[in-house]
Amino acid sequence: MIQLIKGFKDILPEEITLWQQVETLARTIFEDFGYREIRLPILEKAELFARSIGDTTDIVEKEMYAFEDGKRGLVTLRPEATASVVRSYIQQRLYANDPIQKLYTIGPMFRKERPQKGRYRQFYQIDAEVFGIESPLMDAQMIFMLMTLFSRLNVSDITVLINSLGCPACRPRFKESLLSMLGSKKELLCENCNRRLSKNPLRVLDCKVPSCRDAVKDAPSISDFLCNGCESHFSEVKKTLKHLGVKYEIDKSLVRGLDYYTRTIFEIQTTALGAQNAVAGGGRYDGLVEALDGPSQPAIGFAIGFDRLCEILSQNSPISVKPVDVFFIATGDESKKVSFESICKLNVQGITADMDYGDRSLKSLMKRADKLNASFVVIADDEALKSGNVTLRNMNTKDQISIPAAGIAENIKSRIIR
RNA sequence: GUGGGUGUAGCUCAGCUGGUAGAGCGCUAGGUUGUGGUCCUGGAUGCCGAGGGUUCGAGUCCCUUCACUCACCCCA
């Protein structure tokens, strides 16, 4: 037996209804907020991610599905969507027509991590990005939009965490201070964090190793180092969230693993997924467009873990079987022929109809109708057809009536209220 | 990459100190010739993850390996 690849997953028909509902709702809400869909390839040059996410991040260092593609060089299955959206914004010169672009995209991402609950090597994200708006109002609105989606999906039990990472003007001062503080506590830090010291000291802040948490306990806070611009931006975000009625917590240790973030970052956390507590996350990345050779334009975006969201939702909503409207019970050749043709006519008109193609007893066919959750059953055997009438049974009320065999499909259609 | 757990019928699992496999659900056929969801009766289904070893004999012990899973790490 050939099995699927480790960390990959089949999304089965029973689950798909939920996925479709979530997707439809997300599209509706996003479009109401003025976003438009963009569809992007899942294969990109590896360099795109090295330059955006950061080449010392775990994602780029060891989690990409990358391979040499002849003269094109190293290409990779995308580990996230933002870089691709930015690439497209620049390459297609979307800014030329209008620097302000609100875009969303839905699709699979790939990271070669060790799978566990809520984490797959192919996972899905619902992603939204806004270009060309620097205002903190947009930061708040994005979070507000996210929370609107979650609340319409009846996801409670989530927490909004926010923080500000500062900008190139103020972050270096913070880094310096952090570095000198941590330097004196090297023995307390785990092996990993010692490596981080030189590469990306901010990451030490959200290390979960107890001794590191201890070492970091009275570390300087970025909030004490924010420049005036960042400071007022962040307070404006907080103020606006309050006005919009979005509850949030400030988490000074929230750092996030992608290098391109500036100023506001946020994460939506849940307790329903074990260790994988992030269902959505994002932040501002004002320098990225320019860093990727585009115009200097501010931007902000987020991604929702589509898988994870569906997993949370499936925990409190039982899977439902989509019922068929009419099930035909046909015994005998003539009966099967007539039933089959009626079924096709009904299907064309948007009515779910089916029959059994084997040779089974009435009882077992009734059982099958029940299993399929049929609303109506048509009993049409050869003898009935000869007499010119067939039986239409309402499976819920058990009422049966006799209807003319001629033009069954039309007759039934008019009697079924969907 | 590092740890822990688990691998027995389609699914969920039982199988104590080694003696050639069981339950529930599901599936299927019937319950006195046409009518389902409750109930009753019967039936099918397993290389007991794979390979090797110990033993008269292994699902049960030992070794190897693979898969799944949870956690670390990181993120959505």
Image (cartoon, coloured by chain):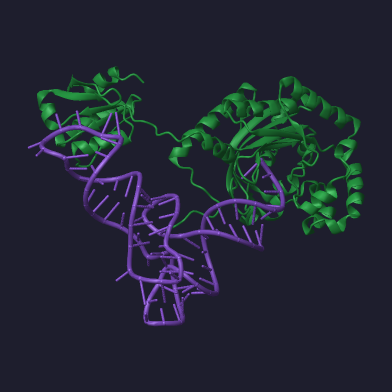
Chain colours: A green, B purple
The answer to whether A408 appears left or right of A162 in the picture is left
The answer to whether A366 appears left or right of A134 in the picture is left
Instruction: State the image coordinates of residue A143 (x, y, percent, origin top left).
Output: 70, 29
Instruction: State the image coordinates of residue A202 (x, y, percent, origin top left).
Output: 82, 46
Answer with the quarter of the image where residue A291 lies. Answer: top right
Which residue is nearer to you in this view: A177 or A108?
Answer: A177
Look at 62% across and 45% down and name the residue there. Answer: A274
Answer with the quarter of the image where residue A373 lies. Answer: top left
Is A212 drawn above or below residue A16 in the view shown? below
Look at 54% across and 31% down and name the residue there. Answer: A22
Instruction: State the image coordinates of residue A109 (x, y, percent, origin top left).
Output: 60, 44
Screen quadrant of the N terminus of chain A:
bottom left
Answer with the quarter of the image where residue A336 lies. Answer: top left
Which residue is nearer to you in this view: B71 or A418?
Answer: B71
Instruction: State the image coordinates of residue A186 (x, y, percent, origin top left).
Output: 87, 57
Which residue is nearer to you in this view: A127 or A296?
Answer: A127
Residue furthest out toward the top: A414
Is A95 drawn above or below residue A181 in the view shown? above
